[in-house]
Image (cartoon, coloured by chain):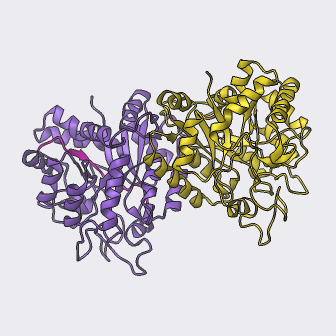
Chain colours: A yellow, B purple
Amino acid sequence: MSFLIDGLQYSNWSEGIFRQLRAGGVDAVHVTLVYHETFRETVTQVERWNRWFERWPDLIFQGFTADDIATARATGRTAIFFGSQNPSCIEDDIGLVEVLHRLGLRFMQLTYNNQSLLATGCYEAEDTGLTRMGREVVTEMNRVGMVVDMSHSAEKSTLAAIEHSSRPIAVTHANPARWHQARRNKSDAVIGALAETGGMLGFSLYPHHLKGGSACTVEDFCTMIARTAERFGTDFLGIGTDLCQDHPDSVVEWMRTGRWTKRIDYGEGSKDAPGFPPMPSWFKDNRNFGAIAAGLRAVGLSADEVGAIMGGNWARFFASSFGPARPARGRNAAE
Amino acid sequence: MSFLIDGLQYSNWSEGIFRQLRAGGVDAVHVTLVYHETFRETVTQVERWNRWFERWPDLIFQGFTADDIATARATGRTAIFFGSQNPSCIEDDIGLVEVLHRLGLRFMQLTYNNQSLLATGCYEAEDTGLTRMGREVVTEMNRVGMVVDMSHSAEKSTLAAIEHSSRPIAVTHANPARWHQARRNKSDAVIGALAETGGMLGFSLYPHHLKGGSACTVEDFCTMIARTAERFGTDFLGIGTDLCQDHPDSVVEWMRTGRWTKRIDYGEGSKDAPGFPPMPSWFKDNRNFGAIAAGLRAVGLSADEVGAIMGGNWARFFASSFGPARPARGRNAAE
């Protein structure tokens, strides 16, 4: 059986969730460390994870290289790979890219909905594409082996990142806009460019990204994946559930407003529905990946295709993405 | 030929000094990153070193494990191991011990002359021994593999650290007080405790630690080492030159006063001699280790003893000190 890998989660982590990861057979997961946090606040989140790794070594450990996926499988644990959904963690300091990579950060979004120092988010009216610093930081991320994630970025910025990056990039958690029109979902132009460049698209289960929202059926979701595979191929497709489990609604408010506004910004929500939307009945937590795999088979995908989408493609992408662009002579395995 | 390792340097690093390290055949050196700097300021120093590693990969690279000493020898480079001379880099946050270890910090002094949150420095009138936080931090340093360095600590605190630490500790740069009475030099009680517990003593060439200061002869210095070996054994002895090359005197003022006083504090210096003292004529830079090795042979030490003192003992100590106390199952090589 191939690996089971989730391309993005941001839950209110607990022993209970770690045990659900094991019950669901999840070999590796890209977890969001931070959104709008500074570097120092990001390090505090690393410290929280270090305490969890120390406390539950039989359930989880930190992943640094793709080899850790096989280690996780072999030892019956889940490898946790860090990511940031916004570049605020590097502040205005390109040197923090290598420092955070050393600490295990393997994904960084160039933007989270708003304009950043690097690029434009999907909620802005004007899209700058990559800024001067954005081009420098993408080059540095390419050098050290940190994946450019454009899930929350605007169209022109996303295409510019794909064009400028010397290594394939990822949209870890979004769906095709042609299936469900939403600011966070991606155009055929972006999806096609990801497919052509060896990038990755992780299909999201966050209800605001689903046709029909929380009521979306597993059949609709899996049919959408099958249509995307028919149109663009299967090799660049994965799952990025965007599972945000057990959080109070105050957390989604932080995600949306950080410190950039004093007003409420509802983002994908609304005044009538300001909180986290309920997840689809068929995907409540990490024990439910089987429903997706079964659904993909039911809509006609082969066992090999399903294995690739459920984790095989992410495993291959991790292996080519997390190391230095040109291994320096004599560098040790920590590199 | 055994390894050549220096247990402490803090120079105004440059390509010229890196080339002197190579000309002198130095396989590894413990370099001071910071004195009174905060965590964020410490990370900025890591960033400076990262730029040097990227710019001069044929001369230097960062050392993380003792295996990097052999890699340095095999590739004709010098492995750079980081350390801090004060615990201000962890602020009041024990979680920063593991974070800084991940970034490569392999030595941390519990104090630098003054009282710290952890213990007492050698210039204080009262010596608390290890504080409550000090005991916790030593235990955490033992867990992750960060060496407790008591070079600038007071007697009771140093003996308490040796007693509390579950792993051998180091005095990376100091000499026996019975040879030259100085606040920074160590009593027979401390030296004996280091010898008994598998710790390390690095002999210092900083003139204030030398009998006769800058005029100290290589014969006097090597005779002192031979007498120490006769009294306590040879296995725990190394060199820690405390070489502070090419710095303006403003740097020694920062080392002495940091942000803790608005007055001038001359430390080991004086109003008449406030700056860096001139190094002995026979040890000006990294090309001069041969003079020490020859001097040790001249006072009667065997070739094996000289090899051990010039680097063999440090290499063995690095190998037993830099990894986790109990390797966690399935952790990767970065651990």
Instruction: Report the magenta residues as a range.
Output: B233-248
Taking the image as shown, residue B27 lies to the left or right of residue A308, namely left
Taking the image as shown, residue A83 lies to the left or right of residue A184, namely left
Residue lying at 82% horizontally and 49% vertically, measured from the top left = A208
Q: Quadrant of residue A92?
A: bottom right
Q: Is A143 one of the magenta-colored residues?
A: no
Q: Is residue B186 above or below residue A95?
A: below
Residue lying at 61% horizontally and 54% vertically, measured from the top left = A12
User: Which residue is nearer to you in this view: B228 or A296?
Assistant: A296
Residue lying at 36% horizontally and 53% vertically, measured from the top left = B140
Can the viewer see residue B279? yes
Q: Quadrant of residue A29?
A: top right
Q: Is residue A151 above or below residue A326?
A: below
User: Which residue is nearer to you in this view: B305 or A249?
Assistant: A249
User: Which residue is nearer to you in this view: B263 or A23?
Assistant: A23
User: Which residue is nearer to you in this view: A289 or B310?
Assistant: A289
Numbered label tally: 0
Quarter of the image with the N terminus of chain B in it: top left
Q: Residue at the left extreme?
A: B231
Chief secondary structure of the magenta portion: loop
Q: Is residue B178 above or below residue B60?
A: below
